Structure formats: C-alpha cells, structure tokens
Image (spheres, rainbow, N blue to C red):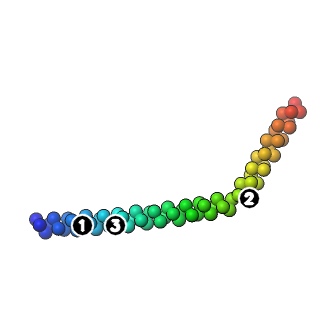
Amino acid sequence: TVQNENNEQTTQNENTEENQNTDNKAEKGDNNTDAADKKAEEIDPLTKAQQEVEELKKQLLYKTAEFEF
C-alpha cells in the first residue's frame, strides 16, 4: 500500500504540472490574441473615421430633408 500511495502521489504531481503547463500555454495564446486585437485597432482609425464621416453625412442629409418638409 505504501508503494500505491507513492504512485498516486507521483501521478497527482505529474497531473498538476501538466495542468499548469496547459494554463501557461492558454495565457500565452490569450496574450497573442490581445496583441492581434490591438494591432487591428491601431490599423482601423482611418477606416473608423471614414465610417463616422459617412454616418454624419447621412444624419445631415436626413436633418436637411426633415427641415424642408
């Protein structure tokens, strides 16, 4: 039984190490995703500004049309 307890303890320790390694890999993956998201946000200001201009043009057009009626 002492041998079994030692084997169980060894198995538990190995499982704990595997879980920690998996967690670390997941965190690194999350960091990579965050970096990609930040890069996408940095590239988008021009596109975002263009979309905003289009929305403002539409609003102006609608307000002008409402004023004429």
Q: Quadrant of residue 49?
A: bottom right
Q: Quadrant of the N terminus?
A: bottom left
The residue type indicated by label 2 comes to: Leu
Helix, strand or loop at mark 1: helix
**Residues at badges 2 and 3 in contact (C-beta under 8 Å)?**
no
- Which callout, 1 or 3, points at the residue further toward the start of the chain? 1
The residue type indicated by label 1 comes to: Thr
Helix, strand or loop at mark 2: helix
Which of the numbered marks, if any, corresponds to residue 46?
2
* Residue that sits furthest to the top in the current view: 69
- Which callout, 2 or 1, points at the residue further toward the start of the chain? 1
Name the residue tied to disc 3.
18
Which of the numbered marks, if any, corresponds to residue 20?
none
CA separation, marks 1 and 3?
11 Å
Name the residue tied to disc 1.
11
Image point (63%, 61%), residue name: 40
Q: Where is residue 4? Give x, y as percent.
A: 15, 66
CA separation, marks 2 and 1?
55 Å
- Which callout, 2 or 3, points at the residue further toward the start of the chain? 3
